[in-house]
Image (spheres, rainbow, N blue to C red):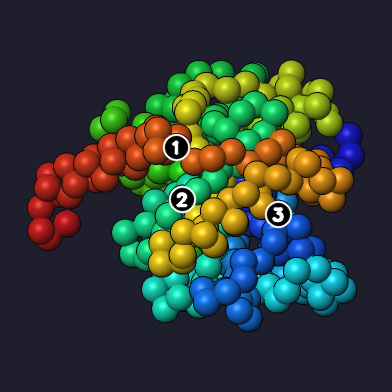
Amino acid sequence: MNYRRTVSSVNRYLCTSLMCALLVSSGIVLPPQAHSEDNFQLTMGYSPGIYQTAPGKDIMAAVSVLMKKISWKYFGKSEARYYDNMSEMAADLKSGTLDVACLPPEEFIYLRNRAPLEPVLVTSTSNGHEAELLLLTRSDSGIHAIGELRNRSIVMPQSPSGSNSMFRVWVETMLMRAGHRNIASFFSTVKETQTASRAVMPVFFRQAAACVVTRDVFNLTRELNPQIGKELTAIANITGLSQGIISVNQNLPEKIKKKISQAFLALRESPDGKQLLMLFQVNAVVPFRPEYLRAMEELFGEHQRLQARFARKAGPHQ
């Protein structure tokens, strides 16, 4: 098995932000002509929570090189900003210095009541616009339910900046339903990986009892190494969750908002756009609909209610 190839090739979950940044830097997203139709610079923001296969610093370097070499050839000025702090992104959205935010769904939920965000598009893979999470264990472990993982170790992708990851929220919600207070008090060890693809291998190599990944990540990993598909099994899943969300600043003129959306939707009509979509294993971007977030909102809402219930039981001195 080629471990390096397996890890570096998994790139299906939420590649939205790098795609967005490259779209800006390559000029495929046509920069609007400014709030006043003159000298407008389109600015996009993205966060480390979006990247599942490469460290943020590597992404920043790649974007910087592409911007210097390519963006000046196309349709005006553009800028891609990397945010590792959601408060800073919110401040820039409020001040009007950030026009587009490319986020995983949990970060969008965190920011939408803190900044003027308007969702316009979602990413879509070969499986559609919905994401599915899996709780995986080894088939020969004898573990068939989450309750049997008590005092065992679990691996999951790291939490995005300033918000809970949907991986952690889902697992903790299942635990609280069963009467357990939280992840930290249930598992012996909770390890967070920098990328989603790296969460699978510790379970495969018996270094952890369980992991949480998306269905897309698991499918691609077992395509690269069929033995993984034979030796790992899902003991729980949740469907209907959203993938990456592309939002615009609510305060932008409607003409500019429409132009941004049209540029993204037209990606498949150009060779460069098709190449980017294929490179990042995103089939397309599709118009956002409120129901696309419903399952995610229900999950996070239930998590908050259960946390509040445990807090009331614990009392003010716990």
Q: Which residue, given by chain and number where applicable, does mark 3 sit on?
A: 19
- The crowding category of the residue bearing disc 3, from other C-alpha atoms within 10 Å (few below 14, some 14 to 19, many at least 20), is many
Q: Disc 3 to disc 1, how far (Cα)?
A: 21 Å
- Residue 290 occupies quadrant: top left
**Residue in the image at 33% along x and 64% along y:** 114
| Marks 3, 1: nearer the viewer | 1
Q: Is residue 222 above or below residue 26?
A: above
Q: Which residue, given by chain and number where applicable, does mark 2 sit on?
A: 119
Q: Earlier in the sequence, mark 2 or mark 3?
A: 3
- Residue 113 occupies quadrant: bottom left
Amino acid type indicated by mark 3: Met
Q: Earlier in the sequence, mark 2 or mark 1?
A: 2
Q: Nearer the viewer, residue 206 or 87?
A: 87
| Marks 2, 3: nearer the viewer | 2
Tag 1 secondary structure:
loop
Amino acid type indicated by mark 1: Arg
Image quadrant containing the C terminus: bottom left
Tag 2 secondary structure:
strand
Question: Residue 79 at what x, y percent from top left?
Answer: 66, 74
